[in-house]
Image (cartoon, grey):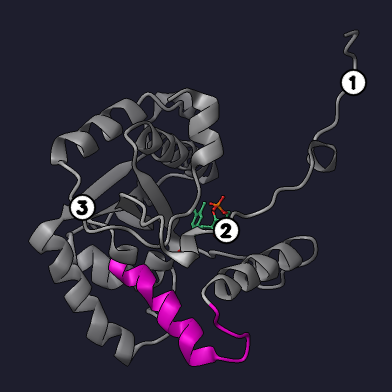
Amino acid sequence: MDVREAVATRYSCRAFLPTPVPESTVREILTRAARSPSGGNMQPWRVDVLAGARLEALKALLRPRMDELPKGEGTEYPIFPKDMSDPYRQRRFSVGEQLYRSIGIPREDKPARYRQYARNFEFFGAPVGLFISIDRSLVLGQWVDLGSFIQTVMLLARDCGLHTCPQEAWATFHRTVAAFLPLPSTMMLFCGMALGHADDSAPINSWRTPREPLEAFANFSGFSA
Ligand SMILES: Cc1cc2nc3c(=O)[nH]c(=O)nc-3n(C[C@H](O)[C@H](O)[C@H](O)COP(=O)(O)O)c2cc1C
């Protein structure tokens, strides 16, 4: 698969088949993803990979936690700004509408929306769950490096015929996850990521998010051709 196709076919997959993914495949994806650039070549990523019984054990741990704390444990970093202005607010609103519409959940059906949100904590049925963390001593520059690492993982997954969903939702249960893995106290959980084979028959995988046209975000000057 060439890079263009990997970029064009990546999307946030929210329904996976139970088909297992071999450990060797995940090892290869992560080994190659470590070629991602990072300021000063600091390589500020840590990844914990769960499958099989370990993954099931975490999911089982989460179920009662979600009943106790439907909104989670609070986050260690702000996932979104408190006061979101347009166009960001509108884009975020509209992706939520698209998502719930695709599975026939009306806006006012809060319990059904919550049940779908809670699927995050089952990795949407994926056979592999990754957790991506960063050292607490690092700063904004390294968080950006983490983002480029995450995108490289997602594109390499496409090259293996796999799909992904990056999941900041997991950061809302950072305490439970950190204790389970366990993560050293020096590390902060940034996000989870579901990895596996897409269920192409699932309506939630049947739509794609829009993007703004090039003119909306890029300025060019000085070109002669
Ligand atoms: C860092 C990051 C965290 C995300 N967290 C979640 C999440 O917790 N749950 C979810 O369903 N989607 C999550 N998403 C997916 C975004 O909603 C998605 O990338 C965006 O709507 C664009 O759609 P696309 O990925 O299908 O192109 C996350 C994406 C990123 C980059």
Examine the residues drawn in magenta and state their main secondary structure.
helix
Q: Residue at x 46, y 84 (%)?
A: 114
Q: Which residue is mark 3?
A: 19
Task: Tell which circle, 1 or 3, labels the residue nearer the N-terminal end.
Answer: 3
Q: Residue 73 placed where, x, y %?
A: 37, 79
Q: Residue 132 placed where, x, y %?
A: 34, 50
Q: Residue at x 15, y 41 (%)?
A: 22
Q: Which residue is mark 1?
A: 221
State which quadrant residue 64 falls in.
bottom left
Q: Which residue is mark 2?
A: 207
State which quadrant residue 87 falls in.
bottom right
Which of these two is toward me, 145 or 101? 101
Judge from the rendering whether residue 208 lies leftward or rightward of residue 218; answer left or right: left
Task: Tell which circle, 2 or 3, labels the residue nearer the N-terminal end.
Answer: 3
Q: Tell me how far mark 1 sits from mark 3, CA to CA.
A: 49 Å
> What residue range appears in magenta?
104-122
